[in-house]
Image: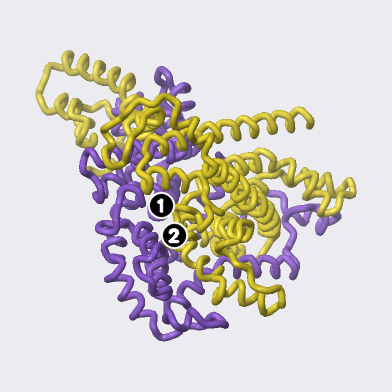
Chain colours: A purple, B yellow
Amino acid sequence: MKPTKPTPQRRPVLRGRAGRHLHGGPLTYAVLILFTAGSLFPLVWTAIAASRNNTRLSQTPPPFWFGGNLFKNLQTAWTDANMGLALLNTAVVAGTIALGTVLFSTLAGFAFAKLRFRFKNLLMLLVVATMMVPPQLSVVPLFMTVAELQWTDQLQAVILPTLVSAFGVFFMRQYLVQALPSELVEAARVDGASSLRIIWHIVFPAARPAMAVLGMLTFVAAWNDFFWPIIALTQDNPTVQVALANLGQGFVPDQSVIMAGALLGTLPLLLAFVLFGRQIVGGIMQGAVKG
Amino acid sequence: MRPYTDQSGPAASPSSGDAVPAPDRRATAAVERPQAGDRRRAWRSRRYRWDTKYSPYAFVAPFFVFFAAFGVFPLLYTGWSSLHRVSLSAPNDMEWVGLHNYTRLLEDEFFWNALRNTFTIGVLSTVPQLLMALGIAHLLNYRLRASGFFRVAILTPYATSVAAATLVFVLLFGRDYGMINWVLDAVGLGKVDWQSGTLSSQVAVSTIVIWRWTGYNALIYLAAMQAVPNDLYESAALDGATRWQQFLHVTIPSLRPTILFTVVVSTIGATQLFGEPLLFGGAGGQKGGASHQFQTLGLYLYEQGWFNFHLGRASAIAWSMFLILLIVAGVHLLVARRLRKSQ
């Protein structure tokens, strides 16, 4: 309890009329519950459809409750659509990209936030400007390069082009400007600490919350990345999204198996959401206010 | 890595150097060899100067190296190859054709079709999405039980991939056995052919986009709403403003920069729309439906490059998309400036 904070009760006249700190009424809850149901329903129904079979899915009314085919369908998706390998590949790709992005973004963000060097503002402007460039613009030469290096179907073809992110640099800079007192860095300097020592003992601890958020956001984005992987990889060594795309484009004609694949590809992130949902929400909201 | 051992006063003692992480070889070299105090101090101060002078560049270097290799170079090379005839089967055989790829694009009805589709799907998905997000954010801004649950739940679609989401919606939008048509039929509105109609298929594709991104945008608006100072609401309430008037005259104006930000981000996203229409089309999805009725620019690029083997033409489409984005960004900027002036 912080005694210095004014409590809303101090001005009873305005309670119920000012726009904030009001309790939601029944209508508010009704709309929110409806919207939440709409958000969650397609996911639940994926599981329902995955637990049925193709014959049941081509009947009306569509199924509203689980059937008994879930494990059979998951198994078919696992073997036929290469989902096991796809999940492993995606974990490697998304993990590496998240680690790389967090590390490089923290280093660059720290330099832009707290260090002095020539062309700093110009370089930062360049970083921000690159957030505008769409991935379509580089896909043709990237494909040529990958073909030339014979990297088709190899994970580095997907990892390397996404290993750094302009958004990450921007995000870390915004965070460190506030969260890391300049005096701390200067004091360490005066004490003769090298830059790497400052990074390790001062910047990383101060940046840890933002690093966690950036890591989660990057992981989700990398896990779900679609455009470049589907060009660079094939069914022989796919990420989850490539495997799903092949499922959807007629690789396996059975709808319930397709849904089982979709479920497999989504489940790891959904689990992460159950565990870290609040942190991810907090991260997005934090990024929004600062960005 | 050794733990932090440096709490005891100034770190000027010579041994301080060996807690430094491994890559800094200069530091360890300096302390391992026994040297005269003077030389050591000179070395130390030179090292210190180098360190402060050059390490910022080392910290930003990885980003720029990767960005140069996988961002700038491909960007320029795309421009270069858009002036050539390049085939997917022999990407190194480039034949100079000047602006031919661009003039051909302007004559191609499918380019204009894709441009039109990208625009309509963009409007159909962005406008309802942002309006709904604004409303939801407003509701979430009340004091609520289980507000944490609502926030996480509305963000869940964001964790779903384009591929997984689209595959589910393909089933839900199925013509004969899809749930949406079953509901429409049950309430007497009749079935809709979501695949083959132009408007209906575009509505279906937009629905997938709306489903995935509304919650995300709602959270961004919510964050901005919570940063609005309460005094503004209190003085508005004192002036007799109703809650709706407060929303219109306090909340919305305070959110203007955030709204502009989401409009720009959503527009960029809409311009690049690719996965949803591709998978909504099923087999042969790069066409965007039997009569290209929901083929976007992204799909058209993919079709030209990876199904018709014209990498040069695909590059020209990519650069056209970039130009369109720049125009859109310019318009946004003008509108924003006009709004600011009129205030």
Q: Position of residue B78 (x, y in %)?
A: 39, 32
Location of the C terminus of chain A by quadrant is top right
Label 2 Cα neighbours within 10 Å, binned few <14 / some 14-19 / many ≥20: many
Q: Position of residue A287 (x, y in %)?
A: 53, 44
Q: Which residue is nearer to you in this view: B110 or B298?
A: B110
The reply to whether residue B266 is in sight is no
Label tally: 2
Identify the residue shown where x is 72% and y is 65%: A28
* Residue at the spot 87% in from the left edge and 47% down from the top edge: B238
Image marks 2 and 1: residues in contact by CB distance under 8 Å? yes
**Kind of residue at badge 1:** Phe
Per the image, label 2 sits on a secondary structure element best described as helix
Farthest residue, direction bottom: A68
Please, is residue B23 above or below residue B248 in the view?
above
What residue is disc 2 on? B163
Q: Could you classify mark 1 by the number of other residues whose Cα lies within 10 Å: few (under 14), some (14-19), or many (20 or more)?
A: many
CA distance separating discs 2 and 1: 8 Å
Taking the view exactly as shown, the residue that stands out farthest to the right is: B240
Of residue A171 and residue A34, the one placed in the foreground of this image is A34
**Would residue A83 be visible to someone looking at this image?**
yes
Labels 2 and 1 in the same subunit: no
SS for callout 1: loop
Q: Which mark is residue B185?
A: none
Q: Which residue is mark 1?
A: A226
> Image quadrant for the N terminus of chain A?
bottom right
Residue B231 picture location, percent across and down: 77, 44
Which chain is home to disc 2?
B
Q: What amino acid is labelled 2 in the image? A: Ala
- Residue depicted at x 16% and y 14%: B39
Determine the residue positioned at 47% across, 33% down: B319
Q: Position of residue A239 (x, y in %)?
A: 32, 57
* Side (left or right) of A151 relative to A21: left
